[in-house]
Image (cartoon, grey):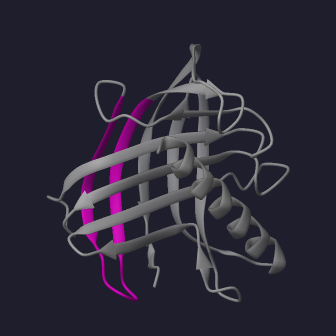
Amino acid sequence: MKASFLSVVAVGLTGLAEAAMAQTGPVPVGTVSATIGDMAYEGETLDVPSEGTSTAEWRAFGPVTSVSVQAHDPAAESLMHGVLTIEMSLMGEDASAGMMDASVSWWPEGMSAPFYINEVIGPDLGIAIDTLSLEEGGSKITGTFSARLCRKDSFFAEIDSGDCVPVEGRFDTAPTTVD
């Protein structure tokens, strides 16, 4: 199941990067500030109006709401380098919603290089939502996160628990709805 989840993330990363590059000016709609190891990180979530896509999205499936916050480092040499992603599945649509599933991942050199991930809510992964308002045309999510991210050489490789990095930070963005 985790491999298929990572495959969906990879396809989403690729599609969003291609869409963002197709337009000369993606529009920043939010921020993710973090410390990854001892490195400061400042990323932006992006809307690409000409493609109708965003790197911060939400989708409702009955009582479950899926939220993805994908930040891109504006100083990176490529749109696909320095990507920090926070994903969560919630039971509800407000800040008190129970979190059913979550992951945090860090893609320092893009999808074809090793990446770092944590996919298990627990002592090594925590996400706290401060505000959550999900409405078409006016959504907002803010919160904090912390995780111990461990290296994976590829989507189907085992996690290398000997090569991990702590991350903690804050997100503030306006996710768009996915139909």
Magenta-drawn stretch contains 136: yes
How many discs mark residues in the rendered view? 0
Residue 10 quadrant: bottom right
Q: Position of residue 114 (x, y in %)?
A: 73, 32
Q: Is residue 24 left or right of residue 106?
A: right
Residue that lies at the very extreme toward the left in this rendered image: 96
Examine the rendered structure and indicate whether residue 128 appears above or below residue 154: below
Q: Is residue 100 left or right of residue 57?
A: left
Examine the rendered structure and indicate whether residue 121 appears above or below residue 1: above
Examine the rendered structure and indicate whether residue 27 appears above or below residue 43: below
The dominant secondary structure in magenta is strand
Q: Position of residue 39 (x, y in %)?
A: 62, 29
Please give the name of the residue rendered at 60% of the width and 39% of the height, measured from the top-left corner: 106
Q: Position of residue 68 (x, y in %)?
A: 46, 60
Q: Is residue 91 left or right of residue 141?
A: left
Quadrant location, the C terminus: bottom left
Q: Position of residue 20 (x, y in %)?
A: 74, 72
